[in-house]
Image (cartoon, helix red, strand yellow):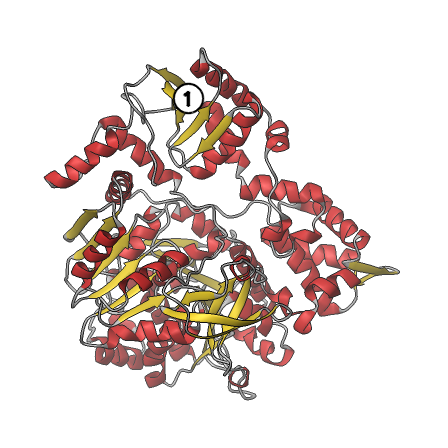
Amino acid sequence: MSSVFSNLHESLQQVLAQRLEWTELREVQERTYLAAVKGSDVLVIAPTAGGKSEAALIPVMDDILKNGRPGVTCLYISPLKALINDQEDRFRAFCIPTSLSVMKWHGDVAKGDRFWKDGEPPHFLMITPESLEVLLQEKKLSSDLRQVRTIIIDELHAFVESERGVHLKVLLDRMDRITKKQVQRIGLSATAGNPEEVLAWLSDSRHKVELVTISSPPKEKQFLFIVEPEEKDRINALVRIVEGKKALVFVNSRSGAEKLMKASSGRIRNLHIHHSSLSPATKKTSEEAFASHDGACIICTSTLELGIDIGDLDVVVQVGPPNSVSSFLQRMGRSGRRGKSAYVAWILKNPCELLCSLAIIECAIHKEVENLVPPKKPYNVLLQQIFLNVYNHSRVSRRKLTASVLSHPVFRNLGQKILDQVITHLIATSYLTPDGEMLMLGTEAEKVFGRSNWKDLYSVISGGGEYRAVTPEGEVVGKLDARFVNSKNAEEISLGGHNWSMVKCDEGHNIVVVVPGGSASSRIFWTSSGEGGFSPLVCRMVGKICARGGSALPLGEREQEVLRMALARIPEGAGGNGFQVVEQAGIKGTEVRIFTFSGSKFNRLLTSLLQDRLGRKVQVHYNDFTVRIMRARKGGAGQHVIRALEEIQNMGEDKMGAVLPMPSAEGWKFARALPPALLTDMSLSDHYHLEDFMDEVKSVQVTLLSEPAGDTELSES
């Protein structure tokens, strides 16, 4: 590969030499530079701390320095404000010595600092999608975005599968229109099971694309597995592992992080906590803890999976297995930098958690990572864009509204008929008001979205389910789940590692006033928006391990024995291709278990359909690996269940959809304004993923296994 370094602008060479002591670029930077200078849209897939940020930054800086580009030349878009704060220092360290300017713009930046003087826009603007939506409403400042040539999207995988990704796609398209050219897009990610499809999603077939993939260099990885059924023994193990070290301790929920923080306080020196419901100041304090030369430990959720730089680590601790291979790779990538071995300690509570952890590692070894699948029926974001379009124009004709919204490529598959259906319903329900040929925002839209100068329209993120917890002095402590605040247990709470007493609740402004105090029994919980459970990829690997009767990983005798305990609960023949049905005697009569190893999302649908086929007197339950049927019938229960499965395989989409319980529209920010038929359509497509379910269930082979000698329950609990 030819050297790019010697051809870079001289001042950029000097910065790289002085800041990083580089005389050459790494492979990821060379390949990204060569792709970017062609004008291609680029997706860079490289390990955590693999130099992706520099890979995107170098060609943009080089172009500005060589060609004297005026105005905002590059947008850096991040899914997290904290990541922008972290990357700001890195960008400034590169740019300021070359006289290039950098500015961040998001909700935690003081309003007075979110501006620039006439004729002095920054070269690099760091922003979230929601703040970019706000900025585009500022006519004077947004005019300075006409010079943008490149948009860097960091942690792209965090956008693709969500409605924020749909919103991002709309914003990218609008930037093409503002600049009157096809702005180059550079996406950065550490993981994606289907990178070519993600690159196509990013680029929209506008022009040339190039994929830059860099594999993790082979290096030693150390894993420690501790399986303890008692919580106190797991806490003791955690204390031993992190003592005197710099450690990240990952848990899978905010409630779990708070619980672990309380149990560990006073036993671990320099202990901190980090999750999405804590105040920015609290999270910043945690991130800065690793600047200490002494040991530091942060208990965290997925908020520290992404690219926030917390420096060198001694150990990553995983309390319970993560739910995906992608999360595991992100977390493991936090350790093992600068020549060190990656070290991950797993603290687990039962044999099933060990089995799932081994499955995750085996997937990673085989380079199997979850595919990223964008929403197919993004009606919720369609509504947001309808409301924004009418709001921005005050009055707009139906024809212009239709043409404007459907011109965005992300909505091209929805079509005129769908949009007509939506607009007609919005008029009928007073979300829109007709005035001759023109449309205006109606009284219902004013009531639901009109508070605070319509700021609710700028984001697809629903924020109505949380209260801000503040002290009497006005210091923000964090956010509390609305269901928790309204529960009978909401007098004393544990938040951010401290106990608080709630003294006042202002429902009108979603504020809870708290003061230090509270008892040792204070608690907290959040209602998760996700379905939980392991990814189907992990579940299928668990099935493969069960089918072969062991893990391919080199395990110690103790781990082998614990794994055997998990596998002993699986009947011979389960875990191979297809579904295996097992009939056995249970406490409440004959029970049937279907071993699917397809994940809880799939099994949830199967459970609803089986309940419909078998009748309401039958009890059907599910977890990630099995569907359990009780009271099916006294004789031939297994065959009875198999016949029900065959009936499901022959059902059409309409019949399946009629059986499934529809989620509440409150789960989406704008969906309450949807026609009921389209809410159902969106739910079946992007909540239940019914099309994918049907593809799998219709092709699966079902086998009846002989009755096992003992219990066959495989459960994470």
| 168 is higher (above) or lower (below) than 215 | below
Residue situated in front as seen by the camera: 6 or 425? 425
Residue 702 higher or lower than 112, as above or below:
above
Compared across the picture, whether 215 is left or right of 607 comes to left
Pointer 1 residue: 591
How far from the left and from the top, in percent, is residue 354?
25, 42
- In the image, taking residue 433 as reference, residue 153 lies left or right, namely left
Q: Nearer the viewer, residue 172 or 382?
A: 382
Q: Secondary structure at mark 1?
A: strand
Image quadrant for the C terminus? top left
* Residue 148 visible to the viewer: no
Residue at 34% of width from left, 34% of height from top?
540
Which residue occupies 53% across, 58% down?
A: 488
Q: In this view, which residue lies farthest toward the right?
A: 436
Figure quadrant of residue 350: top left
Location of the N terminus by quadrant is bottom left
- Residue 62 in percent (x, y) is at 36, 74
Where is residue 552, by image quadrant?
top left
